[in-house]
Amino acid sequence: MYFFLLNLAFLDLVSITTILPKSMANFLWDTRAISYAGCAAQLFFFSLFLSAEYFLLTVMAYDRYAAICRPLHYETLLGSRVCVLLAAAAWACGFLTALLHTANTFSLPLCQGNSVEQFFCEIPPILKLCCSTSYLREVWLLAFSAFAFAGCFVFIVVSYVQIFRAVLRIPSQQGRHKAFATCLPHLAVVSLFITIGIFVYLKPPSISSPSLDLVMAVLYSVVPPAVNPLIYSLRNQELKDALSKLMPGCFEKQ
């Protein structure tokens, strides 16, 4: 679990540094310009880290399933070699997804100027600049990616159905509480990640506006990397003690 958490923490760190330094520099220097190569690099790395994080969260769901549903076989199912291979597979899938989307997006001809309606480069605003008859390739690629991500979502849901069934069969209340406690941080992170992603990319066009799109972009690009460490740190007793002083009655010592 801690090996995967290390990968998740690194992904959160690098994903937020892909966007914020350039955005802060533009704000301080009162400019909105970014080079063509810089825009392509920003889109590639942000897509890479975002996709890799989602695939890694899927792997972590399998880790929780193995730990709770098959504890006696955990060392066999998730030994050091398997953990490294699963993490490498998550990174490789993220890299392949980002490479395909970046190469395809920046091969499309631009007919609508060069003003991106966002504070960083991502696929939807760039597609708005493409010729109306040339972006169908990217739409099909996005549909394929959505299908793959939906498969990961189904895997996570099925894993947690099995986990909850196994936990409810534990006879002692303390045992059930301990099992749930090992899953809740991951479940909270997955719920936050998926909920924000669904709202951003699947919201009805009727409620779309430049200001709302900007707020949503900040929400899904900055909030999850900032909140994930806090969610996982809530299992730390020292942090609970500090928060209990600020919010008496919210945390109980165990």
Image (cartoon, helix red, strand yellow):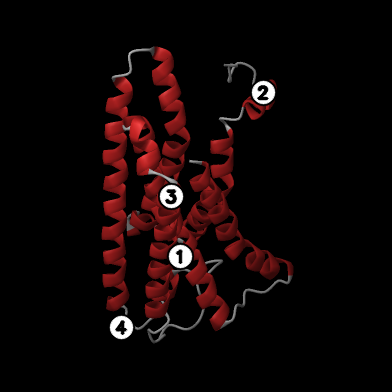
Q: Position of residue 120 (x, y in %)?
A: 54, 67
- Residue 47: mark in rendering: 1
Contact between labelled residues 3 and 1, with CB atoms less than 8 Å apart: no
Numbered disc 3: secondary structure: helix
| Disc 3 to disc 4, C-alpha distance | 41 Å
Residue shown at 31% from the left, 63% from the top: 145
Numbered disc 1: secondary structure: helix
Q: Which mark lies nearer to you, 2 or 3?
A: 3
Q: Position of residue 242 (x, y in %)?
A: 69, 26
* Three-letter amino acid code at the position of disc 4: Ser
Residue shown at 55% from the left, 53% from the top: 12
Q: Which mark lies nearer to you, 1 or 3?
A: 3
Q: Quadrant of the C terminus?
A: top right
Task: Tell me which numbered mark, 1 or 3, is placed earlier along the sequence.
Answer: 1
Q: Position of residue 236 (x, y in %)?
A: 60, 30
Residue shown at 37% from the left, 48% from the top: 58
* Three-letter amino acid code at the position of disc 3: Cys
Contact between labelled residues 4 and 1, with CB atoms less than 8 Å apart: no
Task: From this view, report whether residue 50 is shown above or below residue 106.
Answer: above
Q: Quadrant of residue 170?
A: top left
Task: Give the residue number, with chain letter if any, for mark 3.
Answer: 83
Residue shown at 29% from the left, 26% from the top: 166
Left or right: residue 27 compared with residue 179: right
Task: Give the residue number, with chain letter if any, for mark 2.
Answer: 241
Task: Tell me which numbered mark, 2 or 4, is placed earlier along the sequence.
Answer: 4
Task: Give the residue number, with chain letter if any, for mark 4.
Answer: 134
